[in-house]
Amino acid sequence: MYLILFVLHDPDYLDELLAAWEAEGVRGVTVLFSTGLGRIRQKSAMRDDIPLMPSLEDFYEAPDDLSRTLFTTVQDHALVDALVTATRRVVGNLEDPDTGLLLVMPVLEAYGLQKGRPA
């Protein structure tokens, strides 16, 4: 079993990417809002977008500005290869800037994956 973790830099690709993963046979994906060190460093510089009387909301990025981190587990390496290909088809060459970061890790043990959901 493998864990696939993908940090998608452009959230506009999210729906298309999820559809591509589902078409390859993925049954479930968890999606989280995320940001990286580069964006944090940029935001910690002098900001001119904060109003004179700010609220807490003014200090947080809008969800549209955040990356999406997707993760799922798959049973065999053939599906890993299919998901990598599908991801590249949607977002482009992962070696290019501002596309994303894809990691594949072996899973030694997993609990709670099979909850009786229909296929």
Image (cartoon, grey):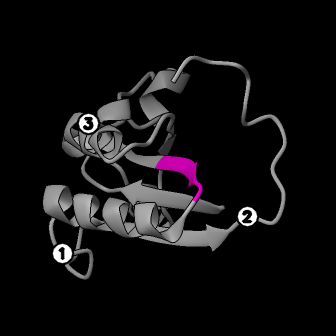
**Who is closer to the viewer here, 117 or 106?**
117
The label on residue 107 is 2
Q: Position of residue 34 (x, y in %)?
A: 49, 47
In the image, is residue 71 part of the stretch drawn in magenta? yes
Q: Amino acid at mark 1?
A: Asn
Query: Residue 19 placed where, x, y %?
Result: 26, 36
Residue 45 visible here:
no
Q: Which mark is residue 16?
A: none
**Disc 1 or disc 3, which is closer to the eye?**
3
Compute the Cα span from label 3 to label 2.
Answer: 24 Å
**Residue at point 19% right, 78% down?**
96
Single out the residue that lies furthest toward the bottom. Answer: 95
17 or 22: nearer the viewer? 22
Q: Earlier in the sequence, mark 1 or mark 2?
A: 1
Residue 98 pos. (x, y %): 24, 67
| Disc 1: which residue | 93
Over which residues does the magenta segment extend? 70-75
Q: Residue at x 48, y 23 (%)?
A: 57
Q: Is residue 19 left or right of residue 111?
A: left
The residue carrying pointer 3 sits among few (fewer than 14), some (14 to 19) or many (20 or more) residues within 10 Å by Cα, namely few
* 94 to 56, vertically: above or below: below
N-terminal of the pair, mark 1 or mark 3, is 3
Dominant SS in magenta: strand
Amino acid, disc 3: Ala
Query: Which quadrant of the view contains residue 9?
Result: bottom left
Question: Helix or strand or loop: what does disc 3 sit on?
Answer: helix
Q: Secondary structure at mark 2?
A: loop
Residue, disc 3 = 19
